[in-house]
């Protein structure tokens, strides 16, 4: 990795001392304000980050009453076709592949030789971590200009959700490379599913300014500054979610980590730096 700039060195120090949750709660409130300031703010954001509004279901900026409505905007459905086939995995979101590959004896690569364990990522759930000890993973970073809703890679039955409290470090690529075990330290939602490909987990990682993560089965998850891990058992409620259906969204952007069993194979192009779109074919498994 190239040497950090003076700005990045300063930010790295600040990320450790900032009151992450307090800053993010303020952002939460600001992004839900209504008024004449909303339209110029969105116009600036669109220009600054090169957002393609032609992809949005509603292309007119004046339609959005709050910044968060704009940020979580739906897209035209025909622009994100879902990979067909009963033994294929569709990409869960728009973004860029940060890392992807095998889970080696429970270890997941973060960046540039840095790693963390599946056990700590999954909140210390030993039985769940054991199911992915030799599985596959893909880490997908959602940039500010991306579509910020997540969808199911394949038909699945929701079994468990775990909220793991933690920090809210930025998940920009340079911070991922610099801050050890970042994804296992940040606040996150662990969503565990049963599928025809075996067990699957989608980890929705919080980050600075990501004050809330929403799922279709639990609504908006805005916990207080929790100190303990919370588990939610859905195994007796039969929550089936179809391939391609929305499963959640980020209110401000972050990262999705997809974990599967070892029988899943990623396609060759699923590697660091690859841009992906929700619905595209990313992997397959034997029927």
Image (cartoon, grey):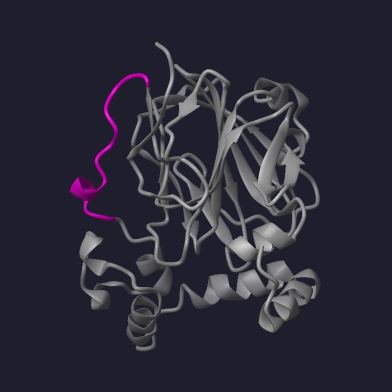
Magenta stretch mostly in which secondary structure? loop
Determine if the magenta segment contains residue 77: yes
| Residue at point 66%, 62% (across, down) | 1
Q: Is residue 173 left or right of residue 280?
A: right
17 vs 22, nearest the viewer:
17
Q: Is residue 141 left or right of residue 60?
A: right
272 vs 122, nearest the viewer:
272
> Which residues are the magenta region?
75-87
In this picture, is 218 found above or below 275?
above
| Residue at point 21%, 68% (across, down) | 59
Determine if the magenta segment contains residue 143: no
Quadrant housing residue 136: top right
Q: Is residue 168 visible?
A: no
Q: Is residue 281 left or right of residue 195?
A: left
Quadrant housing residue 70: bottom left
Outermost residue on the front side: it is 2
Outermost residue on the top side: it is 287
Total tally of numbered discs in the picture? 0
In this picture, is 233 found above or below 203?
above
Q: Quadrant of the C terminus?
A: top left
| Residue at point 63%, 70% (across, down) | 24
Residue 188 position within the rendered picture, expressed as x and y whole percent measured from the top left? 64, 48
Residue 30 position within the rendered picture, expressed as x and y whole percent measured from the top left? 52, 78
Q: Is residue 229 visible?
A: yes
75 vs 80, nearest the viewer:
80
Residue 186 position within the rendered picture, expressed as x and y whole percent measured from the top left? 70, 54
Q: Is residue 18 left or right of residue 209?
A: right
Residue 189 position within the rendered picture, expressed as x and y whole percent measured from the top left? 61, 44
């Amino acid at each position: 990795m190239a040497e950090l700039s003076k700005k990045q060195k300063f930010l790295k120090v600040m990320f450790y001392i900032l009151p992450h949750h307090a800053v993010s709660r303020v952002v939460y409130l600001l992004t839900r304000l209504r008024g004449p300031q909303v339209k110029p703010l969105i116009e600036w954001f669109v220009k600054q980050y090169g957002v393609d509004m032609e992809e949005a279901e509603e292309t007119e900026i004046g339609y959005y009453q709050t910044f968060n409505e704009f940020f979580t905007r739906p897209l035209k459905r025909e622009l994100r076709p879902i990979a067909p086939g009963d033994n294929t995995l569709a990409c869960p979101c728009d973004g860029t592949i940060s890392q992807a590959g095998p889970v080696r004896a429970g270890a997941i690569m973060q960046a540039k030789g840095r790693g963390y364990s599946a056990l700590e990522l999954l909140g210390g759930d030993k039985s769940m971590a054991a199911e992915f000890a030799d599985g596959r993973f893909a880490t997908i970073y959602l940039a500010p200009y991306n579509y910020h809703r997540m969808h199911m890679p394949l038909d699945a039955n929701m079994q468990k959700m775990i909220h793991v409290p933690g920090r809210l470090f930025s998940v920009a690529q340079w911070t991922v490379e610099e801050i050890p075990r970042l994804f296992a330290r940040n606040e996150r939602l662990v969503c565990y599913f049963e599928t025809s490909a075996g067990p699957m987990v989608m980890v929705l990682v919080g980050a600075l300014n990501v004050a809330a993560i929403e799922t279709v089965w639990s609504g908006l998850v805005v916990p207080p500054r929790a100190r303990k891990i919370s588990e939610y058992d859905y195994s007796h409620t039969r929550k089936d979610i179809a391939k391609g259906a929305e499963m959640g969204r980020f209110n401000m952007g972050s990262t999705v980590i997809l974990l599967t069993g070892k029988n899943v194979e990623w396609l060759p192009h699923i590697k660091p730096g690859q841009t992906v779109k929700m619905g595209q074919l990313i992997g397959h498994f034997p029927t």
